[in-house]
Structures are given as structure tokens and as C-alpha cells.
């Protein structure tokens, strides 16, 4: 089985920065796509950013230019650097990954982390 563990959330003032991490563990062969989602109270979960195995990235329009997604394939870890944070960025942030394990190869499965709270005060 695969586990995704997020860290790095917290409380920050508007204009501040946070760096989220997502560590994947288990019988991992490869991680195809890593993504970050967020869900604010009474809102639907939305895709914030995604990165492929070769480093291609896409961002939600509201975070373009402020957030940067990255990954370290050797460590099976993904990151979300969040700069110039705004109160509307307040949400629970979830890591998501499409993972191929040594036992499931060549097929893959989709996994979610437990989420980390990001709160931005005005």
C-alpha cells in the first residue's frame, strides 16, 4: 500500500509564505502525476497545481505566479511553495498522486493524503 503524508500547513498573515510537503511511502515503483488540491469550508475541492513525472506543471488561475509545484523523484516527495498568500487561499490542502507500485505494475492507483490546514489571516 501507499501512504501520502502532508506537512507544512499552518497560520500565516496575508502576504506571507508557506511550503507544503507530501511524502509518499510504500512499495512504490513510480509516481506519474502529483497534484495539490484544496477545499475551503462549504466549497468543492479544487485542483490547485499538478506536476508530471518529467516536470510539466499546470496551475489554477488564482494561484498562477504565486504558487510553485515541484517534486523530488528520488525522495518520492512533492512540494507546494506558496508565496504572497491571500485570505482566500485558506483551505485544507490535499496531496494526490497517481502511483504505480511494484506489485501493481504496469497499472497504477490514485491516492490521497489526509490534508493539512492552511489559514491566511488578513
Image: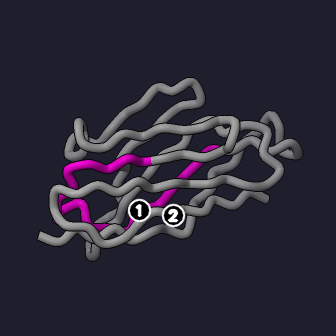
Write the residue at 16% across / 62% down: 14
Label 2 sits on a secondary structure element that is strand
Residue 103 image position (x, y, % from top left): 88, 46
Write the residue at 17% across / 71% down: 121
Q: What span is in magenta?
A: 80-98
**Above or below: residue 87 compared with residue 98:** below
Write the residue at 80% across / 34% down: 106
35 left or right of 4 in image: left
Residue 91 image position (x, y, % from top left): 31, 67
The quarter in which the C terminus is drawn is bottom left
Q: Which mark is residue 120?
A: none
Q: Nearer the viewer, residue 23 or 113?
A: 23
Indicate which disc, 1 or 2, sits on the residue closer to the N terminus.
Answer: 2
Write the residue at 78% across / 45% down: 28
Instruction: State which quadrant residue 12 falls in.
Output: bottom left
33 left or right of 9 in image: right
Residue 118 image position (x, y, % from top left): 34, 67
- Sort mark 1 into few (<14), some (14-19) or many (20+) by Cα contacts within 10 Å: many
Residue highlighted by disc 1: 93
Residue highlighted by disc 2: 7
Amino acid at each position: 500500500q501507499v501512504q501520502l503524508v502532508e506537512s507544512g500547513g499552518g497560520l500565516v498573515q496575508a502576504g506571507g509564505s508557506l511550503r507544503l510537503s507530501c511524502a509518499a511511502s510504500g512499495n512504490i515503483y513510480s509516481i506519474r502525476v502529483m497534484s495539490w488540491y484544496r477545499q475551503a469550508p462549504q466549497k468543492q475541492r479544487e485542483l490547485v497545481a499538478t506536476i508530471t513525472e518529467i516536470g510539466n506543471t499546470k496551475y489554477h488561475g488564482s494561484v498562477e505566479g504565486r504558487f510553485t509545484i515541484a517534486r523530488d523523484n528520488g525522495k518520492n516527495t512533492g512540494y507546494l511553495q506558496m508565496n504572497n498568500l491571500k485570505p482566500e487561499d485558506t483551505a485544507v490542502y490535499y496531496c494526490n498522486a497517481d502511483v504505480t507500485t511494484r506489485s501493481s505494475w504496469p497499472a497504477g492507483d490514485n491516492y490521497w493524503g489526509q490534508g493539512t490546514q492552511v489559514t491566511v489571516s488578513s
